[in-house]
Image (spheres, helix red, strand yellow):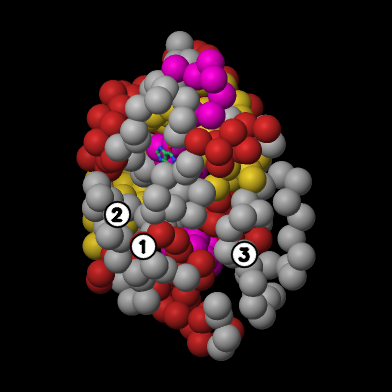
Amino acid sequence: MITDTAEFVKRVDGAASYIRNALSGRPIPSVCIVLGSGLGPLSSMAEDALEIPYKEIPGFPVSTAPGHKGALIAGTLSGKPVFMMNGRFHYYEGYPMETVTFYVRVMGRLGVKALFLTNAAGGIDLDMKVPELVAITDHLSFLAEPVLRGPNIAEFGTRFPDQCHVYDPALTDLLENCAKDLGIRMRRGIYAYSKGPQYETPAEIRAWRTLGAACVGMSTVPEAIAASHMGIRVAAVSCITNMAAGITGNALSEQEVLDNAALASENSCALVREFIKRIEI
Ligand code: HPA
């Protein structure tokens, strides 16, 4: 939990000014895309790309999750300047929530207006087909460590932020239209946040289903909460890489997640590119 708010703001602003300097005259992007499992290939699709390893950015954590590279990319995608986070930070890695969401704070201070979060998730809806995509419309996070606990930082946002529209409805409509026009199967759904790193039990999945969740994963929600606190608009997509625990009778494995994320990669990358082409921000 943050105790010294002035020191924390200084750390965030230090990282932001390091990135601003590294851009050396390039426009500061208004959109940041977070590359979840399967979206790694997008990092090489940016033109004129500048790659800044996280370990070079003062105050930035390093990502330890498998397949998460650990670099911020600034480049052009579909003709627009974008940031891409190639690797994110998860609570299960042992980071406190202010570290998991540190990059979101930095993006906010850089003037980023929209955060596009992507992730791999387990399908809870029984009629889901791996590896289809889900546009996240809301989340269930009340079993998680509260992201905004501790003294509020007024420069970032209000003490009691509204959560009715964490996922921007207009951006979600845009995502849906992009998927439709590209012929990509995508549904809307509620994402249940699981702290991990263990997968869920079948009983937990039945509980989430009763509560209306369509899918479950170990990322995205803390970042979306921090972004909404700062007034950053959020769009989020899950790639269903496996049916959630207890549905097929098979054990869940990281390999299954990575293999199916790779299968969905072409669609996921096409969707992100189309979304960036059409977004007006
Ligand atoms: N549960 C939690 N996180 C996940 C899953 C899952 O089934 N699949 C991919 N990420």
The circle on residue 65 is 2
Identify the amino acid type marked 2: Ala
For the image, the number of numbered tags is: 3
Q: Is mark 3 within 8 Å of ligand 1?
A: no
Residue 20 percent location from the top left of the image: 39, 67
**Decide: marks 1, 2 in contact (CB < 8 A)?**
yes
- Badge 3 marks a residue whose secondary structure is loop
Q: Secondary structure at mark 2?
A: loop
Quarter for ligand 1?
Answer: top left
Which span of residues is magenta-colored? 101-129
Task: Report which residue position mark 1 lands on.
Answer: 93
Is residue 99 something one can see in this rendering?
yes
Given residues 94 and 273, the one toward you in this image is: 94
Residue 181 x/y as whole percent: 50, 13
Give yes or no for contact between labels 3 and 2 (Cβ–Cβ under 8 Å). Answer: no
Q: Is 273 placed above or below 73 here?
A: above
Assess whether residue 26 is covered by the magenta stretch: no
